[in-house]
Image (cartoon, rainbow, N blue to C red):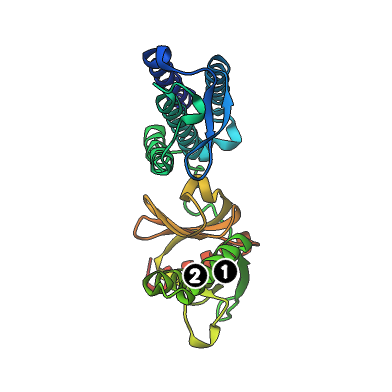
Amino acid sequence: MFWPIVAVFPFVVAAATAAAVHASVSTRLPDPLATHFDDAGRADDFSSTHGFLTGTLLALVALGAVFALLSRVPKLATAAPWVIATGYAVAAGLGYALCLTLLGNAGAADASAVRLPLWQVLLTLPVALLAGALGHLLAGVAPRPPRRPTGDAPRLDVPAGTAAGWSRTISSPPLMTLGVLVLCGGLATGILGIWISCVILVLSGVVSLAVTSVRVTVDRRGLTLAPTLPQAFGIRFRRIGPDRVVEATSRRVDCFGEFGGWGYRVRGRGSGLVLRSGEGIAVRLTSGREFVVTVDDAATAAALLNTYADRARSRQGG
């Protein structure tokens, strides 16, 4: 697998770039260097030129080795593109900060007089994000868990003419915390009179909180996902009728490796409501797409959904 090479590449580039920048300004650098700055951009910590360069280059080499090893861990195979993307972001952020420090010190007679504008420091974030996106692109698509042949999934023995139902609730404390923080931020901006930000943050917080607790139901109507609150209004996120189901199975779902995060996600030929990694229902649809929802006791839900899908095909003469 080429992933270790891809994972190491940004750290090699960052180290080579920093070495080249140092070579170009080495004769104009003070010793010691200004290596840390306060909120106003004034130097408040210093390091020897040789020690600073050696330490940061060794850190880049060590981090490159760590991310190369992580990309080879079998248990992280489905998340390898995200591991590599993180490595690219780290390498770009460190490399940019190193080069910025060297260039900021160049030409200074006294390191205490060095100033580093805040806007230059803030550029570290977009540089890291762009590098992370490049790393994810270069890593390619992670391997997907093998699918079982159609018809291999279990069914529940529900006698003809009778009906059965299954229901579970899945919640996400991290999303709930995020939703509360965003909502509080919106209320705070409203108090300050920043109404556009207030409306955006409050709506985002409400939407986040709506998907933090979801009721997953399988019955004769198929698979239904609805927010736990407010149930009185009959709101639902999605309903998949049994006539649209080719087969349902239960499998382990990696929310970051497969979908890139929590929540209602759409990616490639699949979509899903993933509030955590772990056990989940994977539904193969007649459209050729796959829908996934993470929930406990997924095997029972999948078996019952297959039973209703078989009944729907029988009624249609399939």
Q: Helix or strand or loop: what does disc 2 sit on?
A: helix
Nearer the observer, 201 or 253: 201
Specify whether residue 220 is in view: yes
Quadrant in the picture for residue 285: bottom left
Q: Residue furthest right?
A: 297
Q: Pointer 1 and pointer 2: residues touching (CB < 8 Å)? A: yes
- On residue 77, the disc is none
Q: Position of residue 79 (x, y in %)?
A: 52, 40
- Could you give the CA–CA distance between mark 1 and mark 2, rounded to whole angstroms? 6 Å
Which image quarter holds the C terminus?
bottom left
Left or right of 303: which side holds 5?
Answer: left
Q: Position of residue 98 (x, y in %)?
A: 47, 27
Nearer the observer, 139 or 112: 112
Nearer the observer, 239 or 161: 239
Q: Helix or strand or loop: what does disc 1 sit on?
A: helix
Label 2 crowd (10 A; few <14 / some 14-19 / many >=20): many
Left or right of 247: which side holds 288?
Answer: left
- Compared with 187, 43 (above or below) is above
- Compared with 244, 106 (above or below) is above
The residue that disc 1 covers is 180
Name the residue type under label 2: Gly
Q: Position of residue 153 (x, y in %)?
A: 55, 55
Could you tell me which residue is drawn at 48 percent across and 23 percent down? 110
Left or right of 44: which side holds 269?
Answer: left
Label 1 crowd (10 A; few <14 / some 14-19 / many >=20): some
Name the residue type under label 1: Val
The residue that disc 2 covers is 205
Nearer the observer, 66 or 78: 66
Specify whether residue 240 is in view: no
Q: Residue furthest bottom?
A: 232
- Compared with 78, 259 (above or below) is below
Could you tell me which residue is drawn at 60 percent across and 64 percent down? 177
